[in-house]
Amino acid sequence: MPHQANAGSVGESADVTPLVQLVTPTGERVHEPDNAGDRPGYAARVAHLGADDLRAMYRDMVLTRRFDDEATALQRHGELALYAQSTGQEAAQVGPAHALAPQDMVFPSYREHGILHVRGVDPVDRLRLYRGQDHGGWDPAEHNVSLYTLVIGSHVLHATGYAMGVQRDGAVGTGDPARDTAVVACFGDGATSQGDVSEALVFAAVNDAPVVFWCQNNQWAISEPTTRQSSAPLYRRGEGFGVPGVRVDGNDVLACYAVMAEALERAHAGHGPTFVEAYTYRMGAHTTSDDPTRYRERAEEEYWRRRDPIERLAALLRAEGHWDEQWAADLAAEADALGESLRAGVRALGAPETTSMFDHVYATPHAQVTAEREWFETYESETGDAAEVAR
Amino acid sequence: MPHQANAGSVGESADVTPLVQLVTPTGERVHEPDNAGDRPGYAARVAHLGADDLRAMYRDMVLTRRFDDEATALQRHGELALYAQSTGQEAAQVGPAHALAPQDMVFPSYREHGILHVRGVDPVDRLRLYRGQDHGGWDPAEHNVSLYTLVIGSHVLHATGYAMGVQRDGAVGTGDPARDTAVVACFGDGATSQGDVSEALVFAAVNDAPVVFWCQNNQWAISEPTTRQSSAPLYRRGEGFGVPGVRVDGNDVLACYAVMAEALERAHAGHGPTFVEAYTYRMGAHTTSDDPTRYRERAEEEYWRRRDPIERLAALLRAEGHWDEQWAADLAAEADALGESLRAGVRALGAPETTSMFDHVYATPHAQVTAEREWFETYESETGDAAEVAR
Amino acid sequence: MSTETMPLAKAITAGLRAALDADDTVLLMGEDIGRLGGVFRVTDGLQKDFGEHRVVDTPLAESGIVGTAIGLAMRGYRPVCEIQFDGFVFPAYDQITTQLAKLHNRSGGRIQVPVVIRIPYGGGIGAVEHHSESPEALFAHTAGLRVVSPATPQDAYDMMRAAIASPDPVIFLEPKGRYWSKGEVDLEAPVPTIAADAGTPDPLGTARVARAGTDVTLVAYGPTVATALSAAEALAEEGTSAEVVDLRSVSPLDVPTVADSVRRTGRCVVVHEAPSFLGAGAELAARLAEECFYHLEAPVLRVGGFHAPYPVAKLEHEYLPSVDRVLDAVDRAMSH
Amino acid sequence: MSTETMPLAKAITAGLRAALDADDTVLLMGEDIGRLGGVFRVTDGLQKDFGEHRVVDTPLAESGIVGTAIGLAMRGYRPVCEIQFDGFVFPAYDQITTQLAKLHNRSGGRIQVPVVIRIPYGGGIGAVEHHSESPEALFAHTAGLRVVSPATPQDAYDMMRAAIASPDPVIFLEPKGRYWSKGEVDLEAPVPTIAADAGTPDPLGTARVARAGTDVTLVAYGPTVATALSAAEALAEEGTSAEVVDLRSVSPLDVPTVADSVRRTGRCVVVHEAPSFLGAGAELAARLAEECFYHLEAPVLRVGGFHAPYPVAKLEHEYLPSVDRVLDAVDRAMSH
Ligand SMILES: Cc1ncc(C[n+]2csc(CCOP(=O)(O)OP(=O)(O)O)c2C)c(N)n1
Ligand SMILES: Cc1ncc(C[n+]2csc(CCOP(=O)(O)OP(=O)(O)O)c2C)c(N)n1
Ligand SMILES: [Mg+2]
Ligand SMILES: [Mg+2]
């Protein structure tokens, strides 16, 4: 993968696929020249990250992977209805998450387990939806992470609107790093085809909204390759709307950090939105219900297995002398502990109250809900636990 | 307005607004250099047009303007419910219409009176919808012009789907000028914000569909200036989808002809879609219900009145010695005759049969319609003409 | 109490103005609502007084309008979206149905999305296609939305302020054919709140008896309330006493108020412009049969639009429920 | 007559295959319908056999799918669109409601848009949000669309071919919870045509008496037909004879067939998964009251989903109409 700085510039022809990369697949640093303009180049944006920072990223990626494996196993054991893995996309999630300010707001799709992990959303809560236990699962205000959105693309408009609210709150361009707020909308390559995503680009551009469009191109939308969604590289999607674009190596956690840092800087300063295509790969199935052998080649999967983002960062840590066997062993133990507590936590989730399906339909009394709830309560009390009745 | 060839090339920075122009506002020819590639330049694409061709275009523009004036007057006299003028946009409609092959299919919005005129759609039929007489008005198959579409942007997807049908019919890339078929989708600057238009770009690009996106940027969407819809020039909208774009001087009928001819050539040859921004101006109100004094400056209207596309072509005809007073007088008489026959034709349209509202709801029997129609017929026969009953 | 006479449209303007004045988080968004004041001038003057950041001319994209309004609501704002005409709400249908209606529930009550969607709706104005439709049933079937329509200027004023104050999303259907009918409005009236009980002065959740009567109940809302009242007038001349109930809300339906009336009259005709087939009248007929089975002397009859696209303007008065069609239905109900 | 036993899903596959075989203008479009064969494998093998131009993997954009299908139909094709799950049809709602439903009418009959929209719908499969909904009322209220749902493999096969042959657009709701229930299918059966009269073998417009009975009429369609049949079975053991009518079509509703049954039984319970509020049961209740007022011994009762978002999988069997809830409603109807 060739490295090319200033990737998003309009001057590139569509045939070249410029890619911001700071670490090669074998773990060597890429020292790109500084940008021509007055802003720092991408390499400069990671220069301050020391061994501890890199190890923290590595730790988050490893724990995210473990979360994936455990959740997949839980699904296989019937504890979850479904699960969508992030395996292979850890760099494209942990990197940007590390660049966020606490007040920044993230709108995930359903696969951003790495971002949710870094933001501190409770691991068990993250599986409530996949268990069929809850349509949401956590309080968006607690960690500034909105809920999963399953209708592809819808939340990209919500993120844009939220960013328009941030503007109205005067929380951009103040120069106060604790106040200036950006919003991140996460979505996939397939989602770019949805009208809502294009409309979000329209609204974000004309309003200079502080939003980062973080598109993880994992090269598949279930069984459809990205070529079915676009004949132009996705990082260029925003240009014609007035949103500058950049393509980053999504398996390079430092490059993802740097590109997100730049986009956030723009947003915080009030300079408007950025579209980022993080070029990565969905190493697993679309979800636990999917069977990728029906539509893609094992050779392709093999190719990408050799580009595992976790191994790339491990190689860098080793190359730069930051690898420490004791630390690695501790991390493995921590991952085991996470797995155990996740298994226990998920299993401990009881079934919700049957009447809870009438909760929060409205925030205020609504005669139809009230009447039906009353009927149901009477019916349930008369017939015993209706849940036991087979259909 | 600076002329710049090769307007759509990706290499231009967003700040420049390159514009294909072949005739200046004062009627002088612009002899642009040929394109760098192997295709002819824009000037070369109009070189074959002789005096008769230019006069035919002029005639069509004048008759379109007269149609507008008469329809507006008919609305003022209560004969039409509403009317949307094309005044100021005649070059952006007559130019491309002259470039079409008979088998090409046009999907208009509601303002393409110039295109409908050139295609031969009966003038009275074109006003049935505006009279509140018919939701359509003509047979799309007769002149290969689809119906007006009032929901902004919807028909751009229909055009794209139609073009996908053309591909399946094997009617592209045959080299047979009587067979190769293109599809034109007409829409405005405001429409570019609709998700459907972006989705049409997605579908057209991945399918290489033979469709031309003909966007008339008349600088207003009712009261909103184009800056509320996009912060990038509209001709660039398609690039990030893989659809090349070009901006043409929409008040220059020859430039519009040339740019459309190029786009059609691409489509006919099977090389895929093109996005054209015809930069023009809505000289009148949005519709007869609108009052533009509430939102735009008289000075702006004045500026554009001096750039009237009809006068520009007249100046060219004069400059090149093609103006002929007898011909001009005949044309004025023809316009008068059109006005008269339009007035008479519209007035002669009776009211539709009351039961016709049940016609063509379905092409096959549908019990609900049958029952309601029967009820209505009985009710009508029992109560006399229900139309007379005041509400 | 200082009342003013004003058309329904201006009462809505007054309601918007009052809400903008009272609460900085209220903002209006829509196409052409700024300098133009909206195609019906309902937002006339508001951008001038409250600025471009509170009265926002949006791009021409209804899904974008509602989707960004949801995001603004999540950030603490109370957006009031204008959809230019009824027939143009459908590009936003997904955002309304899968997001706006469900976010409060999805979040277990942690998120509120107090978004109001204003839709000038209904026919009778001689317009072209897509400008005269009545889509209320298409929203009321979905849980999570309140669907309301005022019939008088006072209700328009009160219900608009109540809708904006509501923590739940509200589809606010403005009977555009009645925009210019006038009535008294008390501009000092308190903002009504949504109540748990029928019988409280809660115009977002309770019906209103617009005219008392004893022989037949006419049920209407929005634009057809005036039709029902005219029919009642005509019936009175013939010696039939009709009670007119103005539902005001389609979701929820105030069934107790209607049932109470029907138990007294024994007969009921529901009048709305939307197609009868699967319209609000169907639900009411089903519910009244359940609640008043032994009181009904005749089936609940419906006078509504037909199962056909809204017709061309030249035929719309054949399509719309007219006083005569209401009288015809009352005749049928009385002769049962 | 050569019949084969197959699950309902495979009967749909067979219907699609037969239509693709018989008519070159038929094409399938949707997300993941090609190599994957659709997430339910309903289109399994069809791309391999008919090619990428007839079985088309589309971009991820439902409005685009339906909008381009309309354009293809205008060019003479007969597109069959797959919407991956019920909850994802709403981005296409505008194209379906304002374009697909109305183009034939708008053009004065000059344009036909024979588009079929296949939607795996309904619950009971333990899925996450948006994957279990029943949106039929949201389509049936709009004139210009046919809305149907098969309950047996034979009907699935016949109705799919009839829908594709229909010159009108058809919303084809596939009861995904019953995809794997098996039945006999006659693959040589002629393609049924749409008829003007009730009583003809037209599965797109007429109901089917699935079980004869005398005491109460159970009306169902799609996934709830099996529920109603199980309830009838249970009732038979208790000595109550229930007739089960499988509507097959929600638009149009075959009221004569149901009314005929109700005139004999005097009691009726309508069962569907969609919320009762403003659902198809409401329309049927209203119509039956009109048609059989003096025959009804009890109000028409409805067993449906609640006015709440489709719940989490762990609660869906509380939400869905169960045999027990049907029996409860029959009890109430019988004791009226
Ligand atoms: C509107 C809508 N249509 C269809 C689906 C079904 N669906 C779920 S995920 C998916 C593919 C998404 O691909 P992409 O955007 O690339 O994200 P990824 O899953 O690869 O992360 C599809 C089609 C959906 N959830 N929403
Ligand atoms: C979906 C939809 N939303 C709103 C409208 C109302 N409307 C009619 S024309 C128009 C402006 C269109 O502007 P533009 O696309 O620039 O076309 P122009 O009228 O300038 O030719 C609007 C908002 C509509 N017809 N459809
Ligand atoms: Mg993907
Ligand atoms: Mg315009």
Image (cartoon, coloured by chain):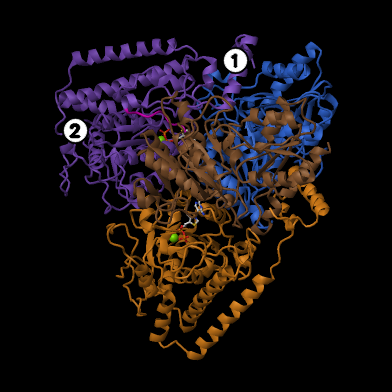
Chain colours: A orange, B purple, C blue, D brown
| Mark number, residue C75 | none
- Quick check: is C215 in the magenta stretch? no
Give SS at disc 2: loop
In the displayed structure image, the side of residue B34 where residue A274 appears, left or right? right
- Quick check: is B149 in the magenta stretch? yes
Image x and y of residue B365, in percent: 52, 26
In the displayed structure image, the side of residue A290 where residue B64 appears, left or right? left
Q: Are marks 1 and 2 in contact (CB under 8 Å)?
A: no
Which amino acid is tagged 2? Glu
Q: Is residue A18 above or below residue B340?
A: below
Q: Which residue is mark 1?
A: B377
Q: Which residues are magenta?
A: B144-150
- In the image, A226 versus D224, the foreground residue is D224
Q: Is residue B72 above or below residue A96?
A: above
Which amino acid is tagged 1? Glu
Image x and y of residue B8, in percent: 27, 47
Q: Is residue A250 above or below residue D57?
A: below
Give SS at disc 1: helix
Quadrant hosting residue A344: bottom right
In the displayed structure image, the side of residue C176 where residue C200 appears, left or right? right
Q: Is residue C305 above or below residue A160?
A: above
Crowding at label 2, few (<14), some or many (≥20) Cα neighbours within 10 Å?
some
User: Residue most toward the front?
Assistant: D1
Q: Which residue is mark 2?
A: B28
